[in-house]
Each structure stands twice: as C-alpha cells, then as structure tokens.
Image (spheres, rainbow, N blue to C red):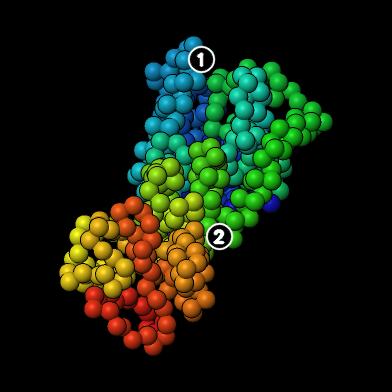
Amino acid sequence: MINLEVQKDVTYVLAANYGPDSMALTHALKKAEANFVMAYVNYKLDPSWDAAEEGLKKYCEQYGIAIEILNAGEGRPENEEEFEKWAHKVRYDFFEEIYKKYDAAALFIPHQQDDVIEAHLVAKETGVKTSKYGLNAVTTARDMIVRRPLINYSREDLVEYCRRHIVPFDENFSNYQQDKSKSKIRREVVSKLDVVERERIIEEMKRRKSDVIDFATRLKKHTEKGESLNVREIIALDAGEFAETLIKFVKAKTGKATKLTPKIIADCRAMCLDPKPNMTLKIRGNVYFTKEYDEISVDTDGLEMPYQYELEKPCKFACENFELDFTMGAEDRNIHMEDYPITVRSILPQDVYLFGGYSVNAKAMLVAAGVSERLLHVWPVFLNKNGKIIYIPRYKKGFFEYHKSRLNIFVKEEEK
C-alpha cells in the first residue's frame, strides 16, 4: 500500500509520465482524494512519447484529473551531457510555471528506490558525505516544495502495485526522466543489480548514516510531538532535511498540513542563524514560528509570542501585553536614569534574578508564586542598557498596586 499524507484544501502538481512509478503515485494521490494536476513533458524522442501522452490524457479524462502538457520536441541538443542539462532546465521551468499557475502546495516527483541507490553511488564515487542516504523525501527547488514519497519502493514494488490496482502504465517509462539522460551508473550498475546486491547496497547506505541515527530519532520525536526544536540541531540539517522537519513540525503543532513555501522555510533558517534572541516569523493566518534563544516553536493563538521593546528614556508606552507610564520616573521599581535605554521583553528559561539576596531562576520564581504557563509568556522583564535584569514585577492574586509609576499587565479574563 502507498499511504500519502495530503491536505484536501490545496492543489499539488505531479511530475508525470506513463511509467509504473508515476502511475502508482497518480493512483495513490487519487485514492487519498488529493486535488492535483499532472504535468507531462513530451520530449518527442520516439513514437512512445506520443503514445504515453495519449495514455495519460485518456486516464485523466476518465477520472477528471487536470493535465498540463509541454511539447519539448524542438531545440534539444544531441550531445548526451548537454541534453541532460537542457532537459532538466526545461522540466523545472515547466513545473515552476504550473506550480505558480495553480498556487500549488508541493510538487510530487515519482523518484523510487533506483534513484536513491543511484544518488548514493554517485555520492560515494565523488566522495560526497551526506547525513541522509540517497534523496530527501522533502526538499525545495526554486520556489517549490518538492516531495518524493516513493523513495522506499523498488520499481518491482510499483509495477506490482499498478497490476494489483489495475492501473495502466508503459514499461518503457521510468520516473519522469528519459533513458537518454540516465547516468552511466544507472545504465551500467543500478539497472543490473539483482535482489541480493540491491539489499547489500541499501544496508551499506543505512550503515553509512548510523552516526546520525540517534540524532535523527531524537529530532523526529520532538518534531512529531510538536515540541520546541533546538536551533543548533535543526541548522545542522541539510536544506531538504530542514524543510521536511519544519513541515512535519508545523503539522504536529497545528493538527493539519499547513502550506509552507520555500521562502518561509528559508526565512526560518535565516531566523535560526540570526543573533537576535527573540524573533517571530508569520507562516500564515495566526500561525507563527517563534524563536526564543535556542528554541524554535509554533504559536497558533498569539499567546506565546515573544516580544522585545527598547525604551530610550522615561516615557509612556503601550503594547498588546502591557502599558506603562514612567514619565515621573520609576525608581520605585529599581529603574534609574542611568539604566536607559532599557529593554522590556518576555521572560526566557535562562533568566536569573536577584531576589531576597539570592540568584534564582526567574521563571521558577514566578511559577512558585502562582503564575500560569500562559501568563508567563505575557509577563515582562526589564533589563538595563548592559543587559542585566533590574526589575521583574511581583505576582500575587489580588495584588494592590502601590508604586507611583504605572504598569498594567494585560491578562485574559480567565487569568484574573
């Protein structure tokens, strides 16, 4: 069985041909009730390409699937290496055009196990080291999210799938690439592997990534639970692994496959690398990535958004979390003129505050006083120009304000 996780309210693009891998993926998308459009590039290399086009059109007409076709028969180079580069550009120019036309959420590529083995052998031959073997299940290309859900299936698996589900296909097609552009390794090695040799290479691939299995397992656990992610861990991932992790993380947190664009993923990576400790990045609607020092989380209701403001001098200031009036001074809160400019920000796990002559963890202190988890995200911390915490408001239910300076913290009705 091929079980796909798809979102019903978005459109996908499938890089299609009439091979068993492509048609198996087409059937799996249809079975998952995904809204998708097929994109077929006809290189007109021989009559079989027109026959494949007719087969795809007939299938799409039968099942009400949209199809876009590019006639790429003219201008192709005869040199094999030049042809491969040209064909790749033509394909992705076309896929990008269709992706934008339908405002797609992802491009599905029917790569399968042969492609994974080839990528591994090429990397091994050229001395390239990767934390993952073969191809990434999710990556980005140009302005597109690219998904490869078949990389754990062999060609024989997909042929059998099509036969079991009575899905038409043409044996002469494999993936969306034509035989003319297959690499030397694909032609002379991968295509001649028997079952035992194939399994040996796959085991070698798994052993090669053994040093990152513990790391990947731990990261997967945090991702699937929707827990916060450690910045240092996720920036160690390559681009594809990073994108895949964010997509799964947002889904786990929001309960649905929220559409992420390559730009949002790139912006999130930039946010991870930015030295600023507190940052937010809008995903869409009321869903945000939030960064608090070494942790990345997802906020869905605006209650856990970190904030940070700088006040150059005593003044009146208001935001959605608090309002203050320090125009007459705030010495009664241990804030003096020489402390300016002061920073007012949300509390962080590592904040330490001098209380009763002892250095205590600020969060632990507030929790012990009865501050709820939600209220902790609103509670302000005041730092002087040197970054030292000089004031944290007391918390006590029914507390009566006695300061001459004014500070009101806004809380939800259920917190009062």
Q: Residue at x 31, y 83 (%)?
A: 401
Q: Amino acid at mark 2?
A: Glu
Residue 402: quadrant of the picture: bottom left
Mark 2 or 1: in front is 2
Is any atom of residue 198 visible in this view?
Answer: no
- Residue 231 — which label? none
Q: Position of residue 170 (x, y in %)?
A: 61, 34
Q: Position of residue 247 (x, y in %)?
A: 50, 51
Label 2 vs 1, first from the N-terminus: 1
Q: Residue at x 17, y 69 (%)?
A: 327
Q: Nearer the viewer, residue 150 or 351?
A: 351
Q: Dot 1 corresponds to which residue?
A: 81
Q: How far apart, in angstroms, are the residues tagged by discs 2 and 1?
A: 46 Å
Q: What element does badge 1 sit on?
A: helix
Q: Nearer the viewer, residue 70 or 338?
A: 338
Q: Residues within 10 Å of mark 1 (few under 14, many from 20)?
A: some
Residue 125 position (above or below residue 245)? above
Q: Nearer the viewer, residue 101 or 30?
A: 101
Q: In the drawing, does residue 169 fall left or right of residue 289?
A: right
Q: Residue at x 52, y 28 (%)?
A: 49
Q: Dot 2 corresponds to which residue?
A: 227
Is any atom of residue 129 visible in this view?
Answer: yes
Q: Amino acid at mark 1?
A: Glu
Q: In the drawing, does residue 221 fall left or right of residue 98?
A: right
Q: Position of residue 60 (x, y in %)?
A: 49, 47
Q: Nearer the viewer, residue 343 or 171?
A: 343
Residue 112: quadrant of the picture: top right
Q: Residue at x 60, y 24 (%)?
A: 128
Can you name the residue that lies furthest to the bottom here? 398
Q: What element does badge 2 sit on?
A: loop
Q: In the drawing, does residue 385 fall left or right of residue 25?
A: left
